Image (spheres, rainbow, N blue to C red):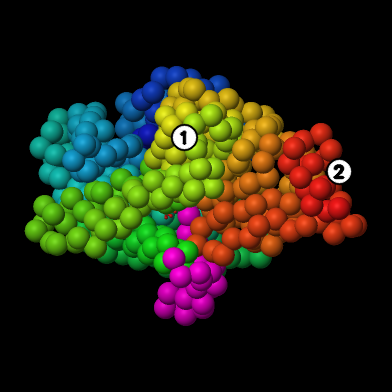
């Protein structure tokens, strides 16, 4: 099929590339001229695992093109709207980009088009789209509107698109339902060349759920809000564990064994971030308010999350006593691993506060440093975790990148000034840290002091004060 995708952000670019991968001919537009030029010349405006390879393959096969919104509107029988819906000051989703695209389709589109809202939008946006497309149509355009919420996670979006658990579509005509089915048939049947798992056995077929437009829109906001609620819930359980001397990892494990609860999204930390959960929870609260539904449960979810960075700062202050003048290594800036996205990342608020209190911050993130630079100009960016830890009074783990799980402990111990790790993501088992000569503070667990290394494990780190103390301890 000939398909168009408007907007080349995380969602749009993944959608366009994957639709081309399963066999469609796709035209993807981007209004930011710099981004568009980059894409047209084979560059990538963002980091997302596997995406660059997929784009390269489908462009070579002549199934993916980049250009203007006007060209995209002229191209596809179905048009996916994937533009941003950022939060307004009052928490509402800003729908001006969606409205702009609707007007452009109404003005330039002709014949029949299926217009698909893929951007996360409040319930009833589909109805508004339908109304405005018909009000402003000038070239005899007739169209259906479908809602097709995306459930892609940054960092695994290609995998999520091609091997989803469910595909949800909200439609109000059988013609729209048939077209949506045709678009997704290769994914529903899991019949396409998978760029990630070449040669792997066929995957489980996803559920193809057809609803009305409003229900599909609600499924997206309700899903994200529910997951955010799970995170805030476990974060409060973590606080309680700290207060009573219990271990949140064990509590979460025990809870997750109940299939009605499940183990996912029960990792405590310094709060959820990114461009989805914070804005979607806010938008869902606003939708409920406007519909006169008292959804104050979600206000508490939001409040708990907003307090996480503050709580973590208190933890840092408790360990360091005075923050002013301290050298702090920050490991991880992205809102989660495997992405370079720092939008609403807890690291940004945390580092701003630490710098505001007079700390000297040396930061390292495998992918997100370029994007963080404009938001955090007054810190030192480092080329690896050890470089960031140079002379540090504390190492603070903010994002759980795999790279931080496999460390040269001796090198690290000889690099820092004080052997202290404050872990906002519970990356390590406390015993592993203490075995390697560090003091450890993590979330909702019983933390431990460093063990004295046994004779066979004597640490060769004579040049640093931390190493000296560890050696003294071993004598
Ligand atoms: C989220 C949803 O998971 C996707 O299904 C949805 O499509 C997407 O939003 C969207 O609306 O576009 P994403 O924002 O990429 O995806 O990130 P998640 O992996 O869901 O993580 C969100 C945040 O929750 C991160 O800050 C993460 O660190 C935090 N988190 C996650 C926890 O603190 N604890 C957990 O147990 C899980």
What residue is at 21 percent from the left and 36 percent from the top?
89
Q: Residue at x 56, y 65 (%)?
A: 446
**Magenta stretch in the rendered image:** 243-269
Residue 454 point in image, percent of width and height: 85, 59
Q: Answer above or below: position of 233 versus 18.
A: below
Position above or below: 260 against 236:
below
Find residue 204 and name its label: none
Element class at badge 1: helix
Judged left or right of residue 232, residue 373 is right
Residue 387 x/y as whole percent: 69, 31
Q: Residue furthest right?
A: 456
For label 2, the SS is: loop
Question: Where, by quadrant of the figure, is residue 208 drawn?
Answer: bottom left
Q: Residue at the location (32% across, 32% down)?
A: 73
Looking at the image, which is closer to me, 217 or 210? 217
Residue 200, by quadrant, is bottom right
Of 322 and 198, the residue lying toward us: 322
Q: Residues within 10 Å of mark 1 (few under 14, many from 20)?
A: some
Residue 4 counted in the magenta span: no
Q: Are there few (<14), some (14-19), or many (20+) residues within 10 Å of tag 2?
A: some
Which residue occupies the foreground of this view, 182 or 122? 122
The answer to whether residue 154 is seen in the rendering is no
Give the quarter of the figure containing the N terminus.
top left
Estimate the x, y position of residue 12 in percent, counting from the top left.
42, 39
Q: Distance from label 2 to label 1 (Cα)?
A: 32 Å
Q: Which residue is mark 1?
A: 354
| Number of numbered discs on residues | 2
As displayed, is residue 258 above or below residue 432?
below
Mark 2, residue position: 460
């Amino acid at each position: 099929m000939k398909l168009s995708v408007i907007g080349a952000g995380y969602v749009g670019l993944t959608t366009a590339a994957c639709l081309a991968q399963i066999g469609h001919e796709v035209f993807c537009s981007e209004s930011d001229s710099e981004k568009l030029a980059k894409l047209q010349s084979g560059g990538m405006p963002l980091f997302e695992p596997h995406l660059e390879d997929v784009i390269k393959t489908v462009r070579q096969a002549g199934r993916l093109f980049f250009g203007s919104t006007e060209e995209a509107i002229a191209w596809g029988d179905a048009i996916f709207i994937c533009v941003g819906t950022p939060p307004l000051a009052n928490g509402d989703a800003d729908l001006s980009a969606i409205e702009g695209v609707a007007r452009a389709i109404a003005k330039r589109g002709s014949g029949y088009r299926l217009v698909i809202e893929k951007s996360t939008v409040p319930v009833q946006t589909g109805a508004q789209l339908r109304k405005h497309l018909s009000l402003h149509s000038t070239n005899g355009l007739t169209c259906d509107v479908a809602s097709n919420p995306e459930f892609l996670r940054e960092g695994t979006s290609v995998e999520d698109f091609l091997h989803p658990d469910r595909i949800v579509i909200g439609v109000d005509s059988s013609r729209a339902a048939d077209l949506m089915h045709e678009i997704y048939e290769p994914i529903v049947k899991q019949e396409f060349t998978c760029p990630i798992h070449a040669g792997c056995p066929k995957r489980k077929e996803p559920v193809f759920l057809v609803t009305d437009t409003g229900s599909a829109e609600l499924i997206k906001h309700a899903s994200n809000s529910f997951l955010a609620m799970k995170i805030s819930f476990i974060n409060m359980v973590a606080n309680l564990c700290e207060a009573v001397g219990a271990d949140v990892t064990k509590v979460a494990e025990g809870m997750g064994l109940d299939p009605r609860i499940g183990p996912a999204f029960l990792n405590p930390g310094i709060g959820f971030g990114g461009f989805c959960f914070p804005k979607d929870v806010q938008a869902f609260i606003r939708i409920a308010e406007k519909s006169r539904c008292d959804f104050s449960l979600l206000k508490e979810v939001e409040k708990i999350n907003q307090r996480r960075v503050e709580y973590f700062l208190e933890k840092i202050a408790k360990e360091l006593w005075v923050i002013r003048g301290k050298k702090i290594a920050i490991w991880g800036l992205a809102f989660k691993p495997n992405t370079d996205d720092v939008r609403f990342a807890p690291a940004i608020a945390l580092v701003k506060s630490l710098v505001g209190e007079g700390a000297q911050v040396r930061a390292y993130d495998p992918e997100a440093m370029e994007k963080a630079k404009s938001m955090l100009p007054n810190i030192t960016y480092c080329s690896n975790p050890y470089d960031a830890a140079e002379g540090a009074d504390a190492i603070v783990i903010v994002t759980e990148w795999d790279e931080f799980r496999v460390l040269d402990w001796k090198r690290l111990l000889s690099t820092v000034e004080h052997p202290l790790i404050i872990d906002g993501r519970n990356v390590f088992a406390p015993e592993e840290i203490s075995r390697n000569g560090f003091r450890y503070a993590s979330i909702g667990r019983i933390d431990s002091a460093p063990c004295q290394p046994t004779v066979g494990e004597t640490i060769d780190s004579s040049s640093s004060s931390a190493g000296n103390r560890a050696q003294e301890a071993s004598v």
